[in-house]
Image: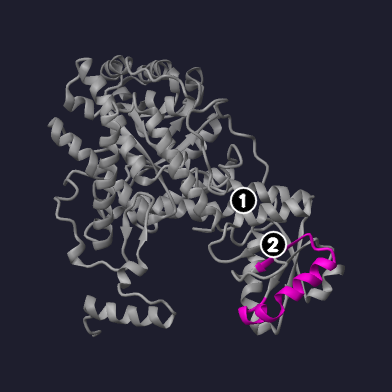
């Protein structure tokens, strides 16, 4: 049996390792901690003392034990065959972003009592709801069993389109639902526009709670009881490949909504629809998206989502094909039926790390929610929200430019010669209030540019391989992230390389003796720009590559020189 190790003993061992690496630190916790975009500190070690003092999640929060999440497939085109294929092969929920007049054709032959249906018709929600109610009436005795959501989300639509948000029709829609579709919810609180605009987890959560509260106010002002109004809402959140961040976000969302419910004397449950993040998807090497969406789906399931939509791996390219839809729905099916992820209620509950991260995230999100409320609520705080998201988006862009984190298949281990499969473009609105960003976009644009220019950089090595191998590998990987081909040799080989940009690769000690002369030789041989792998300053060197440098700036400069 292994001996019990105390926190103090861990601190001693951690300090010893850190000092051997050349770092003079007094607190290993501070040296090894990281901070999220919300200012939440992630410690390197957690124990029982880190558990939050609050009551935690309400007993009714989250999916019931043993009940799998709904496998919810999204359809943006009226394709009855694709819908039936999904339903016959594992999907049990449809997310329909189609025109209201197409609903009878799309749902023709579908047993409405066996699935759930979520509408996404934007400003045409009322027409879509009436069309669905008509179909339910035709189903006879099965109508009362119809489940899902009518999908009204005027604030989310405004965030997408820039149009003014009109909440006045929510009460009318709620009454239609009560009279003709009693098994359905009426309103979606979609937080994914704030995620896709570059927002942090707390910003996404705070916006969702403020939006939900705005809808509650509108419903109660229209004569609907608070308890009933709570049951009309469902919430939609983005799930990312950062599994612990996603688990904590979904748990924090239920904690936050329970606070609102407590004040309103309403049931604390929050119905959650998790959608794998559009921002994390890559257009280049799109097959890596299968791994990202698997992690995100797992995290959504562990986090307690009631329904999960896995975006097809080719989502960033356009409309999915049969294969990508099949992989998307099978991701959930495998996690439920083979990995048994849905068997346990709140499996992350009790984890010192997850509980602490949930509580810290909820606190930051509540602060942001209060800031929105002080500005007049979501209907009045559009500029405040947009500015806050823009600031976080800029911080994230700076980090991504420095490979924090790297994006596999794009900024790390890219395949410059690879060509993505062709897809029909997805229809998008012409104008949007909030931008839709993908983390890989800037690097993918450079890879596209490089594919046309076929640029080359000469890696000029100094000294024996043992001295320059590490920096050579670093420089090669950095340039590959922009689709730049590299050739290697001594500085004297530059003239025959066909390159116009060079990069010196050597140890610091070698640079001190030879870098200036090598740069002069490269310049005489026709080098327009000379990089150096390292931070040392030497005559003749135009720029530097090092861990944490702005890789996008390096690549843009290189491509500019190559194509000048």
Residue with the mark numbered 1: 443
- Give how far across and how far down residue 252 sits, in percent: 27, 47
Mark number displayed over residue 542: 2
> Residue at point 52% right, 53% down?
400
Quarter of the image for residue 221 reads top left
Quarter of the image for residue 79 reads top right
Q: Could you say which is closer to the camera, residue 401 or residue 72?
A: 401
User: Residue 393 vs residue 207: left or right?
Assistant: right
Magenta highlight range: 506-532
Q: Secondary structure at mark 2?
A: loop
- Give how far across and how far down residue 314 sits, in percent: 58, 45
Q: Residue furthest front?
A: 539
- Give how far across and how far down residue 478 sits, in percent: 63, 62
Chain-order first, disc 1 or disc 2: 1
* Membership of 189 in magenta stretch: no
User: Residue 492 vs residue 555: left or right?
Assistant: right
Give the position of the N terminus as an image quadrant: bottom left
Q: Are marks 1 and 2 in contact (CB under 8 Å)?
A: no
In whole angstroms, how far apart are the C-alphas of marks 1 and 2?
A: 22 Å
* Membership of 527 in magenta stretch: yes
> Residue at point 23% right, 75% down?
7
């Amino acid at each position: 049996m292994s001996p019990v190790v105390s926190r103090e003993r861990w601190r001693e061992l951690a300090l010893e390792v850190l000092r051997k690496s050349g770092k003079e630190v007094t607190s290993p916790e501070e040296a090894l901690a990281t901070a999220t975009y919300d200012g939440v500190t992630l410690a390197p070690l957690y124990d029982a003392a880190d558990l939050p003092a609050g009551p935690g999640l309400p007993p009714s929060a989250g999916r019931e034990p043993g009940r799998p999440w709904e496998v919810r497939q999204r359809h943006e085109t009226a394709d009855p065959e694709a819908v039936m294929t999904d339903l016959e092969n594992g999907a049990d929920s449809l997310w329909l972003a189609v025109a209201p007049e197409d609903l009878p054709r799309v749902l023709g032959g579908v047993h409405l009592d066996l699935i759930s249906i979520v509408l996404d018709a934007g400003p045409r929600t009322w027409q879509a709801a009436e069309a669905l109610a008509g179909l339910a009436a035709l189903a006879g005795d099965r109508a009362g069993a119809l489940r899902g959501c009518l999908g009204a989300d005027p604030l989310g639509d405004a965030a997408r389109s820039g149009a003014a948000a009109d909440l006045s029709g929510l009460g009318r829609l709620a009454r239609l639902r009560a009279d003709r579709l009693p098994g359905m919810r009426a309103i979606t609180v979609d937080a994914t526009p704030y995620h896709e605009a570059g927002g942090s987890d707390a910003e996404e959560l705070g916006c969702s709670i403020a939006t939900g509260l705005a809808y509650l106010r509108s419903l109660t002002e229209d004569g609907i009881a608070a308890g009933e109004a709570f049951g009309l809402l469902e919430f939609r959140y983005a799930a990312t490949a950062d599994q612990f961040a996603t688990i904590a976000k979904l748990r924090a969302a239920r904690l936050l909504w329970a606070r609102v419910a407590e004040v309103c004397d309403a049931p604390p449950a929050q119905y959650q629809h998790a959608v794998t993040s559009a921002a994390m998807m890559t257009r280049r090497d799109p097959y890596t998206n299968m791994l990202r969406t698997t992690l995100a789906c797992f995290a959504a399931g562990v986090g307690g989502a009631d329904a999960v939509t896995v975006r097809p791996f080719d989502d960033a390219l356009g409309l999915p094909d049969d294969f990508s839809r099949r992989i998307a729905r099978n991701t959930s099916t495998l996690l439920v039926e083979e990995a048994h992820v849905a068997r346990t209620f709140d499996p992350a509950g009790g984890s010192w790390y997850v509980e602490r991260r949930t509580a810290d995230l909820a606190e930051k999100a509540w602060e942001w929610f209060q800031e929105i409320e002080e500005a007049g609520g979501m209907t009045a705080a559009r500029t405040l929200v947009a500015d806050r998201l823009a600031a976080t988006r800029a911080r994230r862009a700076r980090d991504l430019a420095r490979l924090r984190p790297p994006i596999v298949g794009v900024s790390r281990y890219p395949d410059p010669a690879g060509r993505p499969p062709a897809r029909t473009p997805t229809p998008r609105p012409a104008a949007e209030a909030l931008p839709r960003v993908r983390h890989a976009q800037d690097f993918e644009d450079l890879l596209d540019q490089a594919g046309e220019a076929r640029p080359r950089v000469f890696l000029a090595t100094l000294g024996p391989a043992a001295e320059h191998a590490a920096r050579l590998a670093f420089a090669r990987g950095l340039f590959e992230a922009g689709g730049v081909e590299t050739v290697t040799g001594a500085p004297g080989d530059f003239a025959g390389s066909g390159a116009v940009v060079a990069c010196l690769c050597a140890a610091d000690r070698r640079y001190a003796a030879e870098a200036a002369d090598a740069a002069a030789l490269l310049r005489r041989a026709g080098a327009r720009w000379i990089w150096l792998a390292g931070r040392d300053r030497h005559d003749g060197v135009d720029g530097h590559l090092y861990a944490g440098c702005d890789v996008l700036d390096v690549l843009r400069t290189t491509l500019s020189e190559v194509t000048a």
